[in-house]
């Protein structure tokens, strides 16, 4: 299972939110590049980079940070937040993203998201299916859609999607453990999907459990920043 630390950006700084609420913002580092280099120094190969300013506005905002990290580390970056138009995607890939994650756009403008899958290939486009009570949430989680989570994923599987990042919003940033049942359900019903678990990871012991379920990757945020899971532990897990 791939270990994918998260860096969330507001005003160019590395932050974490709880349940996607911008009012709960904690700044962990003023310099995201420094954080990314620290990850790389511990054998980590992947990074989940989220432009939270972009998620709130209608376009990509923090692409300079993406460019900085991509040009000064070898991390394979998946980038999300504020990708609404072809021009945003172009900027993200030109700035060094390895993959992009589309969340709100996959709900609000299916035609454009399906076009991206066809144009860039399913190895480059990740479906961001974030859930609130098994309904898909959009716009930086500020609103719920009427989309049921599992059928939404299955529908995009038919369009060629391979990778899905699923965050249970109720768990995000709460350090209370991930949604094992929800992930088991997705993996049972959306056969063959490469599921990346996100939200709620709080202890190292949860990682083997997610791997056992069949998750292809897991995104870890606050547990790293709060020292619940050390980079040394992750390094051992990756290199064993």
Image: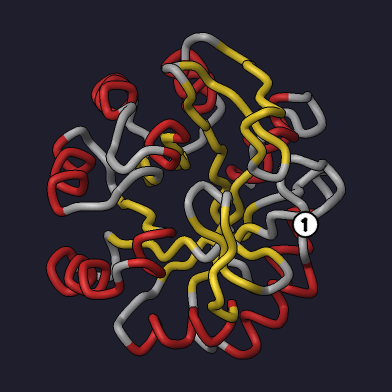
Q: Is residue 32 above or below residue 20?
A: above
219 left or right of 174? Answer: left
Looking at the rendering, in which quadrant would you find the N terminus? bottom right
* Residue in view at x 55 percent, y 37 percent: 6
Q: Quadrant of residue 155?
A: bottom left
Mark 1 lies on a secondary structure that is loop
Left or right, 166 with respect to 62, comes to right
| Residue 93 picture location, percent across and down | 19, 43
Q: In front here: 118 or 71?
A: 118
Number of disc labels: 1
Q: Is residue 60 above or below residue 187?
A: above
* Point 71% across, 28% down: residue: 24
Q: Position of residue 86 (x, y in %)?
A: 14, 53
Residue highlighted by disc 1: 178
Task: Give residue 29's position: percent from left, percent from top.
Answer: 57, 12
Q: Tell me what residue is drawn at x 26 percent, y 22 percent.
A: 64
Q: Is residue 89 left or right of residue 50?
A: left
Residue occupying the far top of the picture: 30
């Amino acid at each position: 299972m791939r270990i994918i630390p998260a860096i969330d950006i507001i005003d160019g700084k590395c932050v974490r939110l709880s349940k996607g609420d911008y009012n709960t913002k904690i700044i962990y580092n003023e310099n995201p590049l420094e954080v990314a280099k620290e990850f790389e120094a511990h054998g980590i190969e992947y990074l989940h980079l989220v432009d939270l300013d972009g998620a709130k506005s209608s376009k990509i905002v923090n692409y300079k940070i993406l460019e900085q990290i991509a040009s000064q580390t070898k991390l394979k970056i998946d980038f999300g937040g504020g990708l609404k138009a072809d021009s945003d995607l172009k900027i993200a890939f030109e700035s060094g993203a390895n993959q992009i994650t589309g969340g709100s756009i996959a709900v609000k403008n299916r035609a454009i998201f399906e076009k991206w899958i066809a144009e860039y290939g399913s190895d480059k486009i990740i479906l961001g299916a974030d859930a609130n009570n098994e309904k898909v949430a959009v716009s930086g989680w500020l609103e719920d859609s009427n989309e049921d989570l599992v059928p939404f994923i299955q529908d995009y599987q038919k369009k060629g999607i391979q990778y899905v990042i699923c965050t249970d919003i109720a768990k995000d940033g709460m350090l209370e453990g991930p949604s094992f049942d929800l992930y088991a359900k997705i993996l049972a019903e959306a056969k063959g999907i490469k599921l990346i678990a996100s939200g709620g990871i709080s202890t190292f012991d949860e990682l083997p459990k997610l791997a056992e379920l069949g998750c292809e990757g897991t995104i870890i945020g606050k547990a790293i920043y709060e020292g619940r899971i050390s980079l040394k532990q992750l390094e051992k897990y990756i290199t064993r």
